[in-house]
Structures are given as structure tokens and as C-alpha cells.
Amino acid sequence: MTLMIQSLPWLAQAAVTTLWLTVSSIAIGLLIGLAAALVRVARVRGLGTLARAYISVIRGTPLLVQIYIVYYGLPQLGIRLGPIPSGILALSLNSGAYLSESFRAALESVDRGQMDAALSLGMSYWQAMSRIIIPQSFRTALPTIGNTFIGLLKDTSLISVITVTELLRAATLVIAATWQPFTLYIEAAAIYWVMSTAFSALQQQVERVASRHVR
Amino acid sequence: MSDNQGSAVAQAVGTMLDARGIKESFGTLTVLKGIDLAVGRGEVVVVMGPSGSGKSTFLRCLTFPEEPDAGTVRVGDITIKAGAAKNQNDRRELRRNAGMVFQHFNLFPHKTVIENVMEGPIAVRKMEKARARALAMDLLAKVGLADHADYYPSRLSGGQQQRVAIARALAMEPQVMLFNEPTSALDPELVGEVLAVMKNLAREGMTMVVVTHEIAFAQDVADRVMFMDGGVVVEEGTPGQLFTSAREERTRRFLGLINRQPQGTPGKPVF
Ligand SMILES: Nc1ncnc2c1ncn2[C@@H]1O[C@H](COP(=O)(O)OP(=O)(O)O)[C@@H](O)[C@H]1O
Ligand SMILES: [Mg+2]
């Protein structure tokens, strides 16, 4: 118990790292996911095919392998990124692929009459998308975005293998010094659980606000 | 005005909308086989015809969300020939000139009533927010909904939503208003309030093309009624001519059918 309390500040600090890794990765992942969904929905020639290939590769391979390719593989091509940028890149590319699928479904679920109405006012296709279609699809995609965030929060533990001192690696380092794996892994798990649960609660609030105009 | 023949009005006071030889097919299904329609400034043309006769497709072809296979459309001073080099700016300009009111209103559900009306002026006319708001309030007052400005559309009845949709279209200050069965998705008791707004518009001199089966409305405000079936214009004339002494058997049969329905409910949605 004393070890738990003693190690808490150190693990809490690592948990903050986990949190901002998650936030950065989901932010970039959202941009990638939206872009990949848009080029498919708008049937932008060439890019649509590229987006499909990207999604297929990411969804068809393990995240851990993707992390290894970015961190150990890319340097062979002369692209050398530190552990943290590599981790964020791998996590963003990964979450982007999953998010793009839910964005695409959300964009396509917006009633066709919305595009008709926007165009009839004289908007361009991209104006209609950005002002009318995308905002409505966000509400539909919100639950998936939230779930992806929680998934990502836990998946950041995988980048401990490339020496990023996030929550899991911080616990492992303490274990190496104290040989108390049970205590420390339980403590790390508890911190993950608190963060996920807090986020779930936040997510419900956001979804309530976002759907206030729906009867 | 109502005793003018065909497009005599159009010739006398200048044509606001001129569509020539509009043809459209979907795969092997030919929906429009060459439709001509010239509408003069301030003229109201009612388009009638059985379900599936191509009325909606025709309206869509007038503003090019649907690119016709052939034909030319002019609205105001913008002319577009189907299939000609796809200049999207011209098409957007043409849409600005033609306000569209849809059967299912198509209000933007994530925006309040007043934001719906301000959307076109801000996004397309690049109007300042304060001016757009003032314009929107005027238009909402005109359709009798100033006190609903800050509601979301989902809180409004169908009739109220359709009146907002009319205000939204008017905010672009269009030269022509196109209505696609504006009352056919409404409960009977809500039809009147929408038709009243449309009648006012007509009296103010708005140029209008209205697809509707509201005989009384057509009799009251239409200068001309066009009857479509099977992708062609079967017959057109003043409401007086068409409703009392249609030349074509097809027209008489159709009018007989819709007359038998209780007023206010013709063309109820089939779902
Ligand atoms: N996008 C489309 N693709 C295929 N067929 C269509 C499409 N739009 C309309 N149609 C067909 O064209 C015909 C005319 O439809 P429409 O213009 O909606 O008629 P109306 O409005 O007079 O009821 C119908 O048979 C309809 O099924
Ligand atoms: Mg129709």
C-alpha cells in the first residue's frame, strides 16, 4: 500500500503523458479520417482509391506491427522519427482508418434533401459539405469517436514497446526496481479505468448537448 | 391576367424563366421527352400530372442538381445548355436566381429557424451577420413566424417548417420561385397556412412555378396550368380552360380523379 502511494505521483505523471498522446493522436486521426471519408464520399478521382487502400491495410494488420514499421522500419528509408512522434504517427494512422469508416457512414446517412437544399441556395459542393453535411454527420459519428478515443487511450500502452514512458512503461520501470508487479500493474490498470470511465461520462454529456435539437 | 394564352404573358413582360427541350432519362427509362416552359415576370404556372409523370425531375432539371440529357435553361440572365462545359459557377449563379421549395421542407435540422434563413445570405451572398439577421427577421415576419426564430425546426409543425423553407428561399432574393408539391406532405389542417403564404407571394408579383394538385389554389392564383403525363406536356391553358373544358381525355381523367379527393389532401405521401 505504501508502494502504491509512493509510486502514485510518478504514475500520475505518466498518465498525463498517456492522456496527451491519446488527445494528439485522436486529433490527427480525426483529420485523417474525415479527409479519407470525404474523398470517398465525394468520389475524388485517385484519392478515393488511395483512401480505400489505406483503410484496408490499417484494418487488416495489427497495431503493434504498424508501430514497429513506423519506429524501426521507416529509419531504413531515411525517415527517422523519435519514439513519441513515431507513436503518435502510428496511433493517428490507425485511429484515422477506423474513424473514416464511421465518418463515411455518417456522411452517407445525412438525408439527400440536405444537399439538395444547400445547393439550391447556390452553395458550392464543398460549402454544402462543410456547412451542412459534415456538422450533421458529426452528431451521428460522435458515439464512434468517443469509443475510438477510449480504445486509443488503452492502445497507447502498446507504444511502451518503443520506449515511450507512458503509463504502462512507467509502471514497468517501477516494477524493475521493486519487483512488485501485482501492486503496480493493478495500480496502472486502476488509473486506465478511472480515465476511461471519466471520459465515458464526459462523452454522454457531449452527446446530450449535440442532440439537443433532435426531438 | 388569367385570360392570357400560353406564354403570351411571357412575351409581353419579359421572360424570367425559359426552359427549352428538356430531356432526361435514367438508364432505359425516359422520364422527360422534351419539355418547354417559358414563364413571364410575375407569372404563376401550376404544373400538374400523375405521380411518376416527371414533375419533380423537371424542376430538378431547371436548377441542375439533375443535369438534363438535353435542353437549355435560362433564369434571369443566366443561360445554361445541358451537357455544355460544366461551369459550376454558372450553375450556382442560376440556382441563386431560382428559389426552391421542397416537398419535405429539407430544413437544416442543426440550425435554428433564423439560422436556416440566414444561411444563404451569409454563405452565398457574403452578407454581414447583422444584416442577414435583419433580413431573416423580416422574412420570418412575412411568413408569420417571427416568434419562432430561435426554435429548432424539429419543434415546428410541418406547415411552420414549410413556411420557414419559403423564407429561406426568399432570403436569396430569387427571380423565380419553384415549388415541388409544397403541401403534399402536410396534414390537411396545415395546408392552408402554406398556400396563404404562397398566394401573398404571387400577389406581390413573384414569378412562380408550382407543382401542386391543389385545384382551388390553381384556380385562384395560376395564370397558366400545365398538365404533364409520361414525360410530355399533354395540355396547357388557363385554369378556367383546363378545369372546365380540357381538350385531352388524359387531362379530364386526371382532373376527375383528383377532384374526387377531399380538398387539402391530394397527393398524400404514399409511405
Ligand atoms: N434519380 C433517379 N433515378 C432513377 N429513376 C428516377 C430518378 N428520379 C426519378 N426517377 C423516375 O422518374 C420517373 C419520374 O419521377 P418524378 O420526376 O419524381 O415524377 P413525379 O414528380 O411527377 O411524381 C419515375 O418513374 C421515377 O421513378
Ligand atoms: Mg414528385
Image: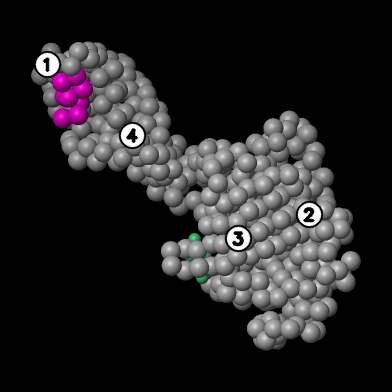
Local SS, label 1: helix
Give me the disc on residue A96. 4
- Asked if badges 2 and 4 are on one and the same chain, I answer no
Disc number lying in front (2 or 4): 2
Distance of label 3 from label 4 (alpha carbons): 45 Å
What residue span does the magenta drawing correspond to?
Answer: A65-74
Q: What residue type is labelled 2?
A: Thr
Disc number lying in front (3 or 1): 3
Distance of label 1 from label 4 (alpha carbons): 35 Å
- Looking at the image, which residue is at 34% across and 26% down? A25
Circle 2 Cα neighbour tier, 10 Å, few/some/many (<14 / 14–19 / ≥20): many
Asked whether mark 2 and ligand 1 are closer than 8 Å, the reply comes as no
Circle 3 Cα neighbour tier, 10 Å, few/some/many (<14 / 14–19 / ≥20): many
Q: What residue type is labelled 1?
A: Ala
Whether residue A70 is in magenta: the answer is: yes
Residue at label 3?
Answer: B22
Q: Which amino acid does label 3 sit on?
A: Ile
Residue A67 place in picture, x, y as percent: 20, 26
User: Which of pointers 2 and 3 lies earlier in the amino acid sequence?
Assistant: 2
Residue at label 1?
Answer: A176
Residue A46 place in picture, x, y as percent: 34, 37
Residue at label 2?
Answer: B15
